[in-house]
Amino acid sequence: MSLLEIKNLNCAYGNVQVLWDVSLSVEQAEIVALLGANGAGKTTLLNTITGFVRPMSGEICFMGERIDGRPTNAITEMGIAYLPEGGKLFPDMTIRENLEMGAYPKHIWKERKELIDMVFELFPRLNERQKQLARTLSGGEQQMLALGRGLMSRPKLFLIDELSYGLAPIIVSEVFRIVQTLRERGITILLVEQNVRQTLEIADRAYVLENGRMVLCDKCCNLLENEYVKKAYLGL
Ligand SMILES: Nc1ncnc2c1ncn2[C@@H]1O[C@H](COP(=O)(O)OP(=O)(O)O)[C@@H](O)[C@H]1O
Ligand SMILES: [Mg+2]
C-alpha cells in the first residue's frame, strides 16, 4: 500500500478546469518531486490533498483511507503537514510562538516541548533566536522556521511547496540537505519545486505536470538523462 495514492483527479475553479485525470503515488520514506512551470497546477494539487480545494472527481487515499472531502484539520491530524508557497508564518510572533502554533492537533499539544527541542536540534540557528520575530528573519531562516513549524505536528507526510523560491544558491543547498535529513528521520516528502536540477539530485522519483496533466513520471536518475527533461527543464 502506498502512503499517498491519488487516482484520476479532476479539479476546477468555477468552470475552469485546472487538473485533468491526475494520478500520483508516494511510498513510505520516499522523496517525491512534483515539477512543472508556473500555472501547471502544482499548488492546486497540494491544496486538494490538504482539503483546501475540493476535487470534482477522483480519489485521494492516505494510509489506505479516503481523505478527499475531509476537512483540513482532520487531514492534518492524520499526519499530513503542509508548508505552503511563501511559508505563511505569523510575522509578528516569535520563532518559539510560531513553532507552538504548529502543534495544534490535540494529541500533539502536550508533546510540544519535546517537539520544539527536536526542531531546535535540527535548526540550531533558530535556537539561538527563539525570541526574534519571524518577520525579522532572513529568507532562509524563514523557510527553516516554516519547515520546523510543519514538523511540530509530527507528520508522516510533509507537503512542501516551492521551498527554494527566492533563496540564495548557498541557502538552497542547505534547505535541500535538511529535506534529506527529514527523510532519514522517517518523514516522507512530496516536494513541489522549480529548481529542477537540484531537486532531481535529492529526490527519488519525480512527476512532471504540464497544463494540469501529468506528462512524465520516473526515477530522478532517469529524468536527469531524459532528452525532453533536459531540453524543457534543465536548459541543456
Ligand atoms: N484560487 C484560484 N481561483 C481561480 N483560479 C486559480 C486559483 N488558484 C490557481 N488558479 C489557476 O489554476 C491554475 C493552476 O495554478 P497553480 O495550481 O497555482 O499552479 P502552480 O502552482 O503550478 O504554479 C492556474 O491557471 C491558476 O491561474
Ligand atoms: Mg504554485
Image (cartoon, rainbow, N blue to C red):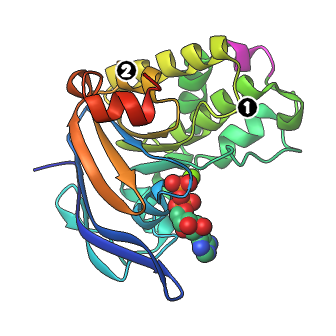
As drawn, is 172 to the left or to the right of 213? right
Vertical arrangement, residue 51 with respect to residue 129, above or below: below
As drawn, is 29 to the left or to the right of 208? left
For residue 128: magenta? yes
Q: Which mark is residue 142?
A: 1
Q: Secondary structure at mark 1?
A: helix
Regarding residue 31, the answer to whether it shows in the image is no
For residue 126: magenta? yes
Q: In which image quadrant can residue 147 be found?
A: top right
Range shown magenta: 125-129
Query: Which residue carries the number 2 mark?
Result: 202
Q: Secondary structure at mark 2?
A: helix
Please state, as top left, top right, bottom left or bottom right, where the C terminus lies in the image: top left
Vertical arrangement, residue 225 with respect to residue 71, above or below: above
Percent x, y for residue 231? Answer: 39, 31
Percent x, y for residue 119? Answer: 57, 25
* Disc 2 residue crowd, few under 14, some 14–19, many 20+, Cα 10 Å: some
Amino acid beneath label 1: Gln
Percent x, y for residue 167? Answer: 69, 25
Amino acid beneath label 2: Ile
Residue at the spot x=61%, y=46% of the render? 102
Q: Going from the N terminus, do you reach mark 1 or mark 2 first?
A: 1
